[in-house]
Image (cartoon, coloured by chain):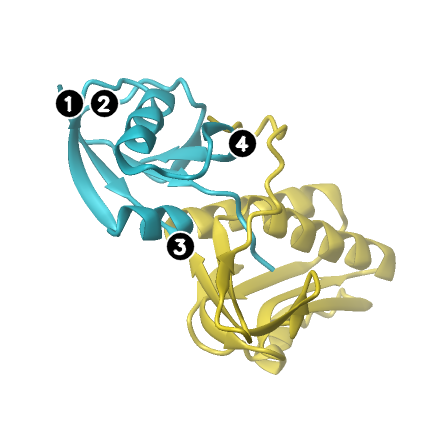
Amino acid sequence: MFRIIAEPIDPPALKAELLDPHAGACVTFEGWVRNHNEGKPVQALDYEAYTQLAEAEGERILAEARARFAVQTIVCLHRVGTLQSGDLAVWTGVSAAHRGSAFDACRYVIDEVKARVPIWKKEHYTDGASEWINCATRTTDPKSPTI
Amino acid sequence: MMQLHLQYFALLREQRGLREETVETTATTPEALYAELRARHAFSLPGDSIRAAVNGNFVPADTGLKPGDTIVFIPPVAGG
């Protein structure tokens, strides 16, 4: 399951969705809002998504991870809206029979989500300035060519 | 001339000052349409940093557009 949500993420509820009698491992990743970026103090972040395509692309990433790694269940949620320093922005969890594939799949999912899913963030700095962050596009990705 | 629907997100939404609009255009591909819109609205992002989606799916820049299509230009993403 991949979802874009506007409400706070609830890790214990999500972890319950990973429970599986075949699983001997559970790896989760939490992405938090940092209070600084590239030397500038960050007050808050606005996350925005093209939800229809973000959820479709997110589900494609989970399907790729299930095909590549021996896993039981994968869940990933990304929050949108205004978040403060310390807030949870993205949560990924994987259950698997063994830890190796759980770690690998979790890493694959969060890396691909950051690179491909249409989610944007605007940083608001403590000096009142703000800026859209445009650093993650891989212009050479054949699956998503640029104009 | 063909009528197309546009939705804007993030930096493009701010620079256009709109979330969506309907346009009449002679552009027949996302590449040509972005060039036209960029010239009209002074979008700062060059085409080679933008991806295109038509009717909810990523498409190549030279995909043929049809009347009534909904186009979204995707600025560099920054989730996580």
Q: CA distance from mark 1 to mark 3?
A: 27 Å
Chain on which label 4 sits: A
> Where residue B65 sits in the image (x, y, percent)?
28, 22
Identify the residue shown where x is 16% and y is 38%: B22
Depth check: give the residue in front, B73 or A17. B73
| Callout 1–callout 2 Cβ contact below 8 Å | yes
Chain on which label 1 sits: B
- The yellow chain is A
Label 4: which secondary element? loop
Disc number placed over residue B28 in the picture, else none: none
Left or right: residue B54 compared with residue A102: left
Disc number placed over residue B2 in the picture, else none: 1
| Callout 3–callout 4 Cβ contact below 8 Å | no
Q: CA distance from mark 2 to mark 4?
A: 21 Å
Q: CA distance from mark 4 to mark 1?
A: 25 Å
Between tags 1 and 2, which lies in front?
A: 1
Residue that badge 2 annotates: B66
Depth check: give the residue in front, A130 or A21. A130
Q: Earlier in the sequence, mark 1 or mark 2?
A: 1
Direction front: furthest residue: A127
